[in-house]
């Protein structure tokens, strides 16, 4: 065999073969997908109803109270206990400003109109809320939830500047939008469905859709058994029971933990 051909044969046969399986993305504990339970606005039902239910089932969630929440002001010890119990306290701004120019936003006061906010004003709220929450839970890093799912202040998209202050960000929509593949999930626009009066079957069907597509999504809950955009206590309980029963298929975690995992393990 000629020297050059021999040399080529040695190189080819000595080169290890890398299989697809060695680089394939995997969720913790062999789960097929991940779901985050999130609760917006700092409502009384979150500490009165949701927290005991999560503790009963051993599940962790992300709570997004606004700093103007009457509940967080009146029951600070209970909100601090959520962090002690392993839940994430995420940033949902100080005053929950939304874009009044969007459909069905007539209820937004002029002084909380994101269309009238400057970028500096919005980021100022974000920084103050981060400081308040750090004093409450001792954590230096946390995710953000766009109020009303809106992310423009004075017409300017604040997704990118937000990244200097928070680890990830969650969207929100009352419609079930198309789910991105795991490779396409934007950590500063993590998808989320906001149920409003839906029953247990609808909630479970959504989780099964996430499992089928082997991706990451979340629920944006508001009131549970009370308050606005509520779902019933029974529907919420059935969802938690389903998640525990199917823990081999679906990883239930916080927005912060899910984002950190994807950051480290996604190609």
Image: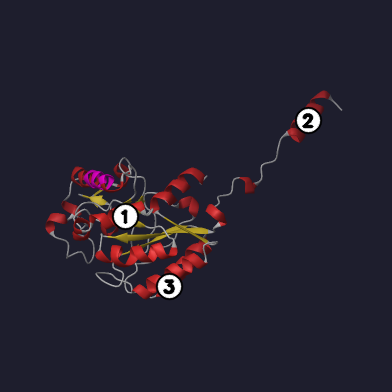
* Residue at numbered disc 2: 10
In magenta segment, residue 168? no
> Which tag, 3 or 1, sits closer to the chain's start?
1
Tell me: 53 left or right of 40. right
Q: Which picture quadrant has residue 47?
A: bottom left
Question: Is disc 1 surrounded by few (<14), some (14 to 19) or many (20+) residues within 10 Å?
Answer: some
Horizontal and vertical percent for residue 172? Answer: 33, 60
Residues tagged 3 and 2 counted as in contact (Cβ below 8 A): no
Task: Report which quarter residue 106 is drawn in.
Answer: bottom left
Left or right position of 110 against 172: left
Span highlighted in magenta in the image? 127-135
Which residue is situated farthest in the right direction here? Answer: 1
Of labels 1 and 2, the one closer to you: 1
As for residue 134 lying within the magenta part, the answer is yes
Magenta stretch, main secondary structure, is helix
Up-down: is 30 above or below 44?
above
Where residue 158 sits: x, y (%)?
Answer: 28, 46
Characterize the local packing of mark 3: few (<14), some (14-19) or many (20 or more) Cα atoms within 10 angstroms. Answer: some
Taking the spot 66% from the left edge, 42% from the top edge, the residue there is: 18
**Is residue 146 shown to the viewer in this render?**
no
Cα–Cα gap, marks 1 and 2: 63 Å
Q: Are marks 1 and 2 in contact (CB under 8 Å)?
A: no
Residue at mark 3 to residue at mark 1: CA–CA distance: 24 Å
The answer to whether residue 85 is left or right of residue 154 is: right
SS at mark 3 in the image: helix
Q: Which mark is residue 238?
A: 3
> Where residue 170 appears, x then y in whole percent?
35, 54
Residue receiving disc 1: 81
Label 1: element kind:
helix
Mark with earlier residue (3, 2): 2
């Amino acid at each position: 065999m000629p020297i050059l051909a021999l040399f080529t044969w040695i190189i080819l046969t000595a080169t290890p073969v890398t299989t697809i399986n060695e680089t394939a993305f995997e969720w913790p504990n062999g789960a097929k997908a991940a779901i985050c339970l999130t609760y917006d606005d700092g409502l009384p039902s979150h500490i009165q109803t949701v927290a005991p239910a999560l503790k009963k089932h051993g599940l962790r969630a992300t709570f997004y109270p606004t700093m103007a929440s009457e509940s967080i002001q009146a029951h600070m010890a209970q909100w601090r206990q959520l962090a002690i119990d392993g839940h994430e306290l995420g940033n949902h701004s100080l005053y929950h400003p939304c874009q009044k120019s969007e459909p069905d936003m007539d209820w937004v006061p002029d002084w909380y109109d994101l269309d009238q906010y400057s970028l500096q004003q919005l980021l100022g709220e974000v920084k103050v809320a981060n400081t308040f929450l750090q004093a409450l839970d001792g954590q230096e890093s946390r995710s953000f939830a766009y109020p009303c799912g809106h992310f423009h202040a004075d017409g300017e998209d604040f997704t990118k500047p937000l990244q200097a202050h928070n680890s990830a960000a969650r969207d929100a929509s009352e419609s079930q939008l198309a789910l991105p593949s795991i490779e396409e999930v934007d950590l500063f626009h993590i998808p989320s469905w906001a149920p409003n009066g839906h029953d247990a079957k609808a909630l479970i069907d959504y989780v099964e859709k996430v499992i089928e597509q082997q991706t990451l999504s979340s629920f944006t809950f508001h009131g549970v058994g009370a308050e606005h955009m509520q779902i019933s206590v029974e529907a919420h309980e059935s969802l938690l029971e389903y998640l525990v029963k199917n823990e081999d298929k679906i990883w239930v975690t916080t927005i912060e933990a899910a984002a950190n995992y994807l950051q480290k393990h996604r190609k």
